[in-house]
Image (spheres, rainbow, N blue to C red):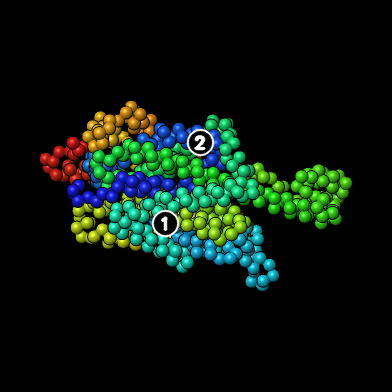
């Protein structure tokens, strides 16, 4: 099997595949949010420390396992010990869940990309009501960008109980997204190896263009100052360190089996240690680079909103008190307000409820992540730019490249173990296996195109992987260090690459990284328990804003099933292997591979 196993055309293809997989939407829409929440520049301190003690060591471990065993996740861990096959199965299950909902983001990106060619942009203004006497009430109470997202894109229901029908436009976009993914993975490494050059490099071109544009926007410096001004007190906040560790962990895509799958197509002599360091550094550098772009645009948006608020207050006071045009400015606004309040107390008290409290700081402190940042905050900024259609096309094209690049790794985590299976590959060609996986994911993904689909998307995004991946990577690390044997694995790596492990890798694998994962696991588990009844954010059309609601019993049951279905694979497969071995009389217990 090793003789006929496909290989990457060059080591560079492998590196680009890992970068394309690791550098994804989380770099663009979660890392800037964490910087905003946990002290701006000071957040980089725990982030870099966690990169060194967690990110690089665990990435190197997975790449080394894949390259040594030369199989997908199931086969690789079965080779270490038959009792560990469940680790690979758990990775495949989590990756299947991820593929099911992750490609929906690409469908939404396609939807926005298609609408980006309209002039004006459809989310730049509120639509007229049925009588054409004013704007739609829901849009007026929210904003044009929120209305386009919640009503035109999602057509969201008031709660998760009201599932509604499949929305045909998002459904067609989802089919298109899966068709693109299928064409990219059709021929395995042969086709994926060519696609990753585009999905890895082009997002940087778009980010650079956006950086140049962002730095020239009015108010960009306000955003950059907010990002780089450190709030050192946040270093004493445990959540800053926990979120730094979590961001590193999930940003690199550890535990899904994708990195093991990619590394299994390497030459055995490939220097995976060097590649692990390169991919880790590029991934983290991209997060910082994307944050500079994001905060420059965020500063523009905050400044625009702040100045718009001031202009409305100035106009209100000018008209209410018959002031001379141009007399009232942003510089003398506070002094004039104090004068009017003392000189005309009764009239000022009538106008006061309409005077908004304009604050640039509060605009900058409005923290948003995930789809809210990608499809509401960014579109809010884009609509106010000159030639907004161009910037919208570039932005959503970049999102698509990032999303599709990550999907190549997500699908590889599922397909590699399936194509490695002699039973499956003897009946079905690689193209058919890929097609069936894409078809199954697309069919299940239709759930997310229903009116309540966004709520189910949040459930999958929040609960399908977090605890499962932490447990998977913990078992992987313990298995390599203490079941297979760290000295034995060191000998394998030296025989493969000619390089011996230094003390840093052994210390991280043997102690620091596992303890860190256990700490994260305990934190998330206790957080779920302390939280009590799990809640979600539902869209209230009447108020034009999100409201908090409790998950109904059937949603809680799905959450439990999502977590258990992957985690339970590890003990159940081990138990099944033990029972099977014991039933075969005289067959000794399996030992780790020699």
Question: Which residue lies at the image location 47% right of the left edge and 61% below the top edge?
Answer: 110
The answer to whether any part of residue 140 appears in the image is yes
Question: Which residue lies at the image location 73% right of the left edge and 50% below the top edge?
Answer: 310
The answer to whether any part of residue 33 appears in the image is no
x and y percentages locating residue 95 in the rendered image: 36, 50
Q: Local crowd at mark 1 within 10 Å, few (<14), some, or many (≥20)?
A: many
In the image, residue 120 above or below residue 53: below
Front position in the image: 447 or 123? 123
Element class at badge 2: helix
x and y percentages locating residue 206 in the rendered image: 49, 52
x and y percentages locating residue 13 in the rendered image: 33, 48
Question: Which residue lies at the image location 23% right of the left edge and 40% below the top edge?
Answer: 81
In the image, residue 414 above or below residue 64: below
Residue 107, by quadrant, is bottom left
Question: Which residue lies at the image location 46% right of the left edge and 47% below the top edge?
Answer: 26
| Furthest residue toward right | 343
Q: Is residue 335 left or right of residue 257?
A: right
Q: Which label number is shown at residue 44?
A: 2
Decide which of tag 2 and tag 1 comes sooner along the chain. 2
Q: Which label number is shown at residue 103?
A: 1
Which is closer to the viewer, label 2 or label 1?
A: 2
């Amino acid at each position: 099997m090793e003789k006929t196993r496909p290989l990457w055309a060059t080591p560079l293809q492998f590196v680009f595949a890992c970068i394309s997989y690791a550098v994804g939407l989380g770099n663009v829409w979660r890392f800037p949010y964490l910087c905003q929440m946990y002290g701006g520049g000071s957040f980089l301190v725990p982030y870099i420390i966690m990169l060194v003690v967690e990110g690089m060591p665990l990435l190197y471990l997975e790449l080394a396992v894949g390259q040594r065993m030369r199989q997908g996740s199931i086969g690789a861990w079965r080779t270490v010990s038959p009792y560990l096959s469940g680790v690979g199965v758990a990775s495949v299950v989590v990756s299947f869940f991820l593929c099911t909902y992750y490609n929906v983001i690409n469908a939404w990106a396609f939807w926005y990309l298609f609408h980006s060619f309209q002039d004006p942009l459809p989310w730049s203004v509120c639509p007229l009501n049925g009588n054409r006497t004013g704007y739609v009430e829901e849009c007026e109470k929210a904003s044009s960008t929120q209305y386009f997202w919640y009503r035109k894109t999602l057509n969201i229901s008031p709660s998760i109980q009201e599932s509604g029908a499949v929305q045909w436009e998002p459904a067609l976009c989802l089919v298109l997204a899966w068709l693109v993914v299928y064409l990219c993975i059709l021929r395995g490494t042969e086709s994926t190896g060519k696609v990753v050059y585009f999905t890895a490099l082009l997002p940087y071109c778009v980010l650079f263009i956006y950086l140049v544009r962002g730095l020239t926007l009015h108010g960009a410096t306000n955003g950059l100052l907010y990002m780089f001004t450190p709030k050192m007190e946040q270093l004493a906040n445990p959540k800053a360190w926990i979120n730094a560790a979590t961001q590193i962990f999930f940003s690199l895509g550890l535990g899904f089996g994708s990195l093991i799958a990619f590394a299994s197509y390497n030459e055995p002599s490939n220097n995976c240690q060097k590649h692990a360091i390169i991919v880790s550094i590029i991934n983290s550098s991209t997060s910082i680079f994307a944050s500079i772009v994001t905060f420059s645009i965020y500063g523009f948006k905050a400044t625009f909103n702040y100045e718009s608020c001031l202009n409305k207050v100035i106009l209100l006071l000018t008209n209410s008190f018959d002031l001379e045009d141009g007399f009232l400015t942003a510089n003398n606004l506070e002094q004039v307000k104090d004068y009017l309040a003392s000189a005309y107390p009764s009239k000022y008290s009538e106008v006061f409820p309409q005077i908004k409290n304009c604050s640039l700081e509060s605009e900058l402190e409005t923290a948003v992540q995930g789809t809210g940042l990608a499809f509401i905050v960014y579109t809010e900024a884009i609509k106010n730019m000159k030639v907004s259609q161009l910037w919208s096309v570039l932005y959503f094209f970049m999102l698509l490249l990032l999303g599709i690049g990550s999907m190549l790794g997500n699908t590889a985590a599922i397909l590699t173990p399936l194509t490695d299976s002699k039973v499956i590959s003897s009946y079905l060609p690689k193209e058919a296996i890929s097609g069936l996986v894409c078809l199954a994911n697309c069919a299940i993904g239709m759930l997310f195109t229903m009116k309540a689909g966004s709520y189910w998307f949040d459930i999958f995004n929040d609960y399908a992987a977090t605890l499962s991946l932490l447990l998977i990577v913990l078992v992987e690390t313990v298995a390599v260090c203490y079941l297979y044997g760290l000295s034995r694995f060191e000998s394998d790596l030296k025989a493969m690459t000619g390089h011996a492990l230094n003390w840093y890798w052994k210390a991280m694998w043997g102690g620091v990284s596992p303890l860190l994962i256990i700490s994260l696991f305990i934190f998330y588990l206790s957080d779920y328990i302390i939280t009590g009844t799990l809640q979600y954010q539902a869209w209230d059309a009447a108020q034009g804003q999100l409201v908090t609601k409790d998950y109904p019993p059937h949603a809680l049951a799905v959450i439990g099933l999502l977590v258990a279905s992957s985690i339970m694979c590890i003990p159940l497969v081990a138990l099944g292997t033990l029972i099977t071995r014991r039933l075969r009389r005289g067959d000794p217990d399996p030992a780790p591979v020699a």
